[in-house]
Structures are given as C-alpha cells and as structure tokens.
Image (tube, grey):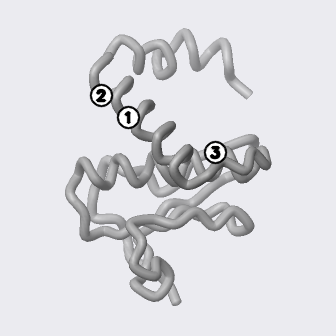
C-alpha cells in the first residue's frame, strides 16, 4: 500500500546517506501503526505521519534520520537515545543559524563532495 505525497514543501522527498539514496514520504495508518514516523532501513525509506504540526514534523524527521544512521552503523541505540540525539540536533540547528551554515555552505559542500 502506498503512502501519499508529503504536504510540507520544505521536507525533501529524497536524501543520500552513506552513498545510498533514501526516500521520505507520508506513511499510511497501516504502515505507521499509530507512530509519528518510521524508518525502514532495508528499504531506505522514512515514513512520516502527515497529520502533525510543522515543529513535530521536523522533530519526527530528524528522529527518523538518526534512526537511519544508527541502524546502518549498528549502534543499537535505545529509542530514548535516538530521540534525545534528535532533540539536541534540532535545538542546535534551530537556535544557531551559523551552525547550519558550517555544514550547508558552499565551502563545506566543495570540501566534502563525494
């Protein structure tokens, strides 16, 4: 069963992690089983519940991205650890625009191009 397109334009449909292409899309109720998001590592897929506030969507997306990293690296983090790392990153990026620039600016992209 397919999900729907994400309603928030600022959420990308794809991203690259460790050389692999990942997809982000809205999940169906059946796929999400009541959760706000889900990371399906074997399919390189992140599902999001589209019925959340913008702030909640950002937190959920970052939470699932942390899951994608920790699962690919076999870190075996607990759900609480994943959530707290996501909250910390969200706070850093939300409250320190210059920190975002370090990683998103042209200089960083040129130095770390794969």
Q: Nearer the viewer, mark 3 or mark 2?
A: 2
Question: Which label is found at residue 94?
Answer: 2
Q: Nearer the viewer, residue 9 or 43?
A: 43
Pointer 3 residue: 16
* Residue in front for this viewpoint, 97 or 36: 36
Quadrant assignment for the C terminus: top right
Residue under pointer 1? 90
Q: Tell me where residue 16 sits by quadrant.
A: top right
- Residue 8 % position (x, y): 27, 57
Dot 1: element:
helix
Report how far apart the C-alphas of labels 3 and 2 lie in the structure: 22 Å
**CB atoms at circles 1 and 2 under 8 Å apart?**
yes
Give the residue drawn at x 77%, y 44%. 73
Q: Earlier in the sequence, mark 3 or mark 1?
A: 3
At mark 3, the secondary structure is: strand
The image shows residue 105, relative to residue 60, as above or below, that is above
Residue drawn at (47%, 57%) of the image: 13
């Amino acid at each position: 069963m397919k999900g729907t397109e994400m309603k928030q334009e600022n959420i990308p449909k794809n991203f690259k992690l460790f050389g692999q292409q990942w997809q982000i899309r809205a999940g169906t109720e059946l796929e999400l089983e009541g959760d706000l998001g889900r990371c399906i590592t074997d399919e390189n897929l992140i599902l999001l519940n589209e019925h959340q506030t913008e702030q909640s969507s950002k937190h959920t997306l970052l939470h699932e991205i942390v899951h994608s990293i920790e699962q690919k690296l076999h870190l075996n983090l607990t759900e609480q650890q994943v959530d707290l790392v996501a909250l910390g990153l969200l706070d850093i990026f939300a409250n320190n625009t210059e920190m975002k620039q370090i990683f998103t600016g042209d200089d960083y992209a040129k130095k770390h191009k794969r």
